[in-house]
Image: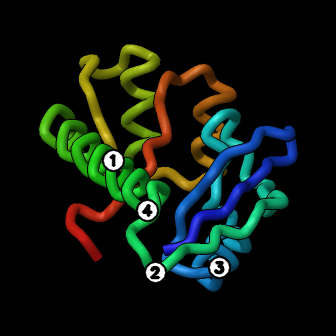
Amino acid sequence: MIVYNLRCAKDHSFEAWFRDSATYDAQAKAGEVVCPVCGNTKVAKAPMAPNISSSKASSPDAAGAAEVMGKLRELRAAVESNSDHVGDKFPEEARKIHYGETEKRNIHGDATPEEAKSLKEEGVDFSVIPWVPRGDS
């Protein structure tokens, strides 16, 4: 795993974890790296200091990263157990709920960055969640 400090075109800074640098490059090129503040997909690496580990013990950063990943797995489990999975129909279902065309309920699913931008522009209330694998990988 590798962490990058990223900055969107609107100058929001955030961190993101990737399997390796090639994974970041592929996701960034495909517009799949999204600013958690504004939803912008124009994201670039920000300057960062190198993290040099010693052979003595696991660094606090590694322990913190493991804790964050555990919390994100807990979040995923909570979302999955308290909402309906609508898959790639998420934008359509979110709009139906927003405009009162169907009953209000919790849903989760998939949306492209373009679909998410469109939903945001329409005032549809939703959140982008960093969806981590269920188990260690």
> Can you say which quadrant of the picture contains the C terminus?
bottom left
* Mark-to-mark CA distance, 4 and 3: 24 Å
Q: Earlier in the sequence, mark 1 or mark 2?
A: 2
Disc 1 to disc 2: CB gap under 8 Å? no
Q: Quadrant of residue 118?
A: top right
Q: Identify the mark at residue 62; answer none if there is no mark.
A: 4
Q: Position of residue 112 (x, y in %)?
A: 56, 55
Q: Nearer the viewer, mark 2 or mark 3?
A: 2
**Position of 60 relative to 104 (above/below):** below
Question: What is the x, y in percent for residue 130?
Answer: 45, 50
Residue type (three-letter) at the residue carrying disc 2: Ser
Q: Residue at x 16, y 32 (%)?
A: 82
Sooner in the amino-acid sequence: mark 1 or mark 4:
4
Q: Residue at x 43, y 62 (%)?
A: 62
Residue at the left extreme, as displayed: 81
Closest to the observer, 104 or 82 = 82
Residue 9, above or below 93 = below
Disc 3 residue type (three-letter): Ala
Q: Is residue 127 left or right of residue 66?
A: right
Q: Front-most of 79 and 12?
A: 12
Percent from the top left, x then y, of residue 18? 53, 70
Q: Is residue 21 above or below residue 73?
A: below
Q: SS for tag 4?
A: helix
Q: Which residue is mark 2?
A: 55
Q: From the viewer's perspective, is 16 left or right of 103?
A: right
Residue on which the image places disc 1: 72
Distance from disc 1 to disc 3, alpha carbons, whole Å, reads: 23 Å
Q: Secondary structure at mark 3?
A: helix
Question: To which residue does mark 3 refer?
Answer: 26
Residue 83 image position (x, y, % from top left): 20, 34
Residue 93 - label? none
